[in-house]
Amino acid sequence: MTINLKALYGNNWQEQAERYEKIREGFQETFGGSQDAAFFSAPGRTEIGGNHTDHNHGRVLAAAIDLDIVGMARKTDTGVVRLRSVEYPRLDTVDLNDLDPRWESSGSQALIRGICARCQKLGYQTGGFDCYTQTRVLKGSGLSSSAAFEILVVTVVSHLYNDGAIDPVTAAQIAQYAENVYFGKPSGLLDQMAASVGSVTAIDFADPAEPVIERVGFDLNAYGHALCVVDTGGSHADLTSDYASIPPEMKAVAAFWGKEFLREVDETVFYDQLGEVRKAVGDRAVLRAMHFFDDDRLAHEEAEALKVGNFSGFLEMVRASGKSSVQRLQNVYSPANPIEQGITLAVSLSERLLGRHGASRVHGGGFAGTIQAYVPFDMLDQYRAGMERVFGPGSCYVLSVRGAGGTKVER
């Protein structure tokens, strides 16, 4: 896919043109000149529904957002990928002659290596390139900066070496492989799929090899609400073990019936044998399975509500999903660090500020990072001020949905 600045950024295209020019300058300073180089962009994502359902083959509702990572890249004949970013000025290098998994001094190196290895295994061409990036997707904020980076790299490989032939679903699967196998983070496919496909999408992962994707028309402005994400200041950097505990606990419940994933288990049978399951796998695993069944259903019902314009019903479902994440999924703080509970505090404060209006919930993987809120326009200034008094200036972001996923960008 190729798109121009005006189509991608709308009324903000001139500000973005200045940003792109700075990226060009950085590329020139790093790699010498910018002839034959091209721009690429991949968005962050917001999870609307389906909190930790994707890795057990559940349903989700997600959207690409207007915060993105942009890279300028140029093909080389060296067989080496060189990448530098504004945020991390060290130069990462990956020799494509050695793509075996290994310990890497940089997460970027691991992801690049994994993406190129998977592309080759799937029959796509790879080769050396130089790339200079700048991101507005906050690292560790729950907006999935890692998935945005992965989709950017896949998009670069697709356009530089495969005439843009890697489709969005395959791009997401390649990115997830790199994160799982080379980076060691056991994520589902939600983050990469939302960043790759773009817009608001309902995704059914019953068969992750062929996920069912449906675009959902959702103009939040028409309902007089803003979509906010509040950064509580906690980082996801040391929370891999917390994330990693959720999929196997859900799968342990599924294994009670000889199944691999909870999506394969009959919910009625689960509740009929709840006592036996509890004795076999423990209370937290059972609670997390209860969350899966409800949030899998809620993600589907949220999409259906939006299709018919039932926004009040949608907000009720958002609240129900958030309550389930707190009580049953238990991903609002790390058990290893109970003193830090920024997510719980932010949700509690958000509920106080909104009263009976809008809705809020934990956002993304949880344990630290961000919450998501739907805020009526006439309450937005008050809401933002109230959240930023606690979490700091600039911590409350008003997001817009982006129609495009990973794409080449024409000036």
Image: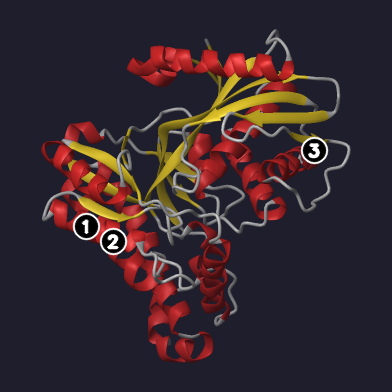
Mark 3: secondary structure: helix
Q: CA distance from mark 1 to mark 3?
A: 49 Å
Q: Residues within 10 Å of mark 3 (few under 14, many from 20)?
A: few
Mark 1: secondary structure: helix
Q: Position of residue 153 (x, y in %)?
A: 65, 33
- Determine which residue is flagged by label 1: 349
Identity of the residue drawn at 22% across and 54% down: 350
- Determine which residue is flagged by label 3: 120
Residue 301 sits in quarter? bottom left
Q: Residue furthest top?
A: 35
| Residue type indicated by callout 2 | Leu
Q: CA distance from mark 3 to mark 2?
A: 46 Å
Mark 2: secondary structure: helix
Its colouring scheme is secondary structure
**Does the CB distance between marks 1 and 3 fall below 8 Å?**
no
Residue 280 vertical position relative to residue 137 in the rendered view, above or below? below
Residue 188 vertical position relative to residue 292 in the rendered view, above or below? above
Closer-to-camera residue (98/338)? 338
Q: Which numbered disc, 1 or 3, marks the residue that appears first in the sequence? A: 3
Q: Position of residue 125 (x, y in %)?
A: 79, 29
Closer-to-camera residue (390/172)? 390
Identity of the residue drawn at 46% across and 13% down: 18
Q: How many marks?
A: 3
Q: Residues within 10 Å of mark 1 (few under 14, many from 20)?
A: some
